Amino acid sequence: MLRKNRISILMAAFLAAACHGSAQQQPLRVVMVNDSGSAALDRELRAATAEGLVSLDEEGKVVPGLAERWIVADEGRGYIFRLRDSAWPDGTKLSGETARQALRRAIAAQKGRALGQDLTIIEDIRAMAGRVIEIRLAQPMPNFLQLLAQPELGLEHRGQGAGPMRRKHVEGLDWLTPISPDARGLPMPEGWAATVRPLSIRAMGGEKAVAQLLAGQADVVLGGRITDLPPIQRGLLGQRTARFDVAPGLFGLIVEKDSGFLAVPTNRAALAMVIDRAALVNALGMQAGGIPGWSPTTRLISPGIGEVQLPERWSDMDMDHRRAVAVERVAVWSKARKLTARPEEGDGLELRIAMPDGAGANVLFSRLAQDVAAIGLRLRRVGMGESADLRLVDEVARYPSPVWFFNQLHCGVHPVCTPDADHLVAQAWNVEPPLAPALYAEAEREVMEANLFIPLALPVRWTMIGKGAGNLLRGLVPNAYGVHPLYPLSDAAR
């Protein structure tokens, strides 16, 4: 009781100070699913507390952030941003120079990551007079603003972002309160304080999160992935609303160690072809009570992205034929290995696969283990932080371009890679736009023939809304990229 009273006193004081009266609104209780790690929660918290030059709204559209407006110049190679008239939290004036320094720090923090590879398109960042900043690109990039709006590029000055929300961590909870528009250099609507509410944020596994929702201890669950989805009984959907976003991106297995069995390209192809993706998607879909629009894939680039139109692989072979080919390849390799391997080294047919926790991940592992067992392989499941031969990748595309998919597997990000594909993608930047799709198609063929990434299906993200909370969550809308930022949920007047 004393602990609860302490939290209440602290939060009442904090909320009153932070949003000038919005503490009168009941907080929206948000649970973020973290079976796959804390990265998604960290991104959402940064997006809510550290705006970039531009941001993403609840529909996944680019909207002004610290920049109130911008123009595109030099045939798409120059982006000139006019910053709003405001200050950083410590009182320092927001200027082109402080924004330039903050953006350079944010970009440097992504070095060696896939997002860092995306950002190599930036050639220079220039502070111009007063509140103006220019970003120069090496080549035009049609989706550059969507890339720039990613949470990791939220700008901080002396360790603090400029909003739109302020974060306070109290007794294991993150509290987010909206910052008044006038404090952010924006027009102040009349009666603003009565229209906003704070958010309380907790992180936990998918099964526990849904249990909290059913017990009335949470209003909404965000950030769910198919791997952490608990079984949903059909009766549950009558009381609670589950929403699914099927998004472009990568959901599959990446080869982390091209040694042993996985050192041989035909062996990797055997592994890729023997997975019954339709059965896998069906098993996971049944657990979810059905996921409209979710389908398996053998391709790297998601349908509808760019103009690359390659067919699905092995469409001319049924599963029995694919298993027969895979069995023969495993047998050939195993026979050759016995001539050179020492007895204590084992048969080399066990592969370690790194997967997150979660009920959905259990179903996924069971299906994969069953499929590979049919050709004489064994899977051993390990945690995401452990050394593995294969690792599950579940990433939603940040922007709609074939380049995003290739950068996830770039040799600057993963040492086990396909250099020829990287070379082809680099070439595509330097040719006339009508010629680029052919180079992307050739690069995708290179990646697929190498079988260093084994696609399974499109990524799925899910949210669940508590009973009676639906009318309070008009800021939570479906969108093509599964983006559900926290700030729009603070609007209690929708």
Image: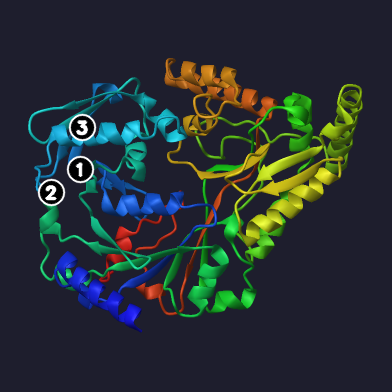
Q: Position of residue 465 (x, y in %)?
A: 46, 71
| Up/down of 296 relative to 168, above or below | above
Question: Label 3 amino acid?
Answer: Arg
Q: Report the mark closest to the observer, 3 or 1.
A: 1
Task: Name the spot of residue 274 as percent of width and height, x first.
Answer: 79, 40
Disc 2: which residue? 90
User: Which residue bears the numbered disc 3?
Assistant: 100
Q: Is residue 162 above or below residue 290?
A: above
Of circles 2 and 3, the one toward us is 2
* Residue closest to the eye, 304 or 414: 414
The x and y percentages for residue 435 are 49, 18
Residue carrying label 1: 158
Quadrant of the snapshot with the N terminus:
bottom left
* Crowding at mark 3 (Cα within 10 Å: few <14, some 14-19, many 20+): many
Q: Position of residue 83 (x, y in %)?
A: 15, 40
Relative horizontal placement of residue 188, taking residue 25 as reference (left or right) = left
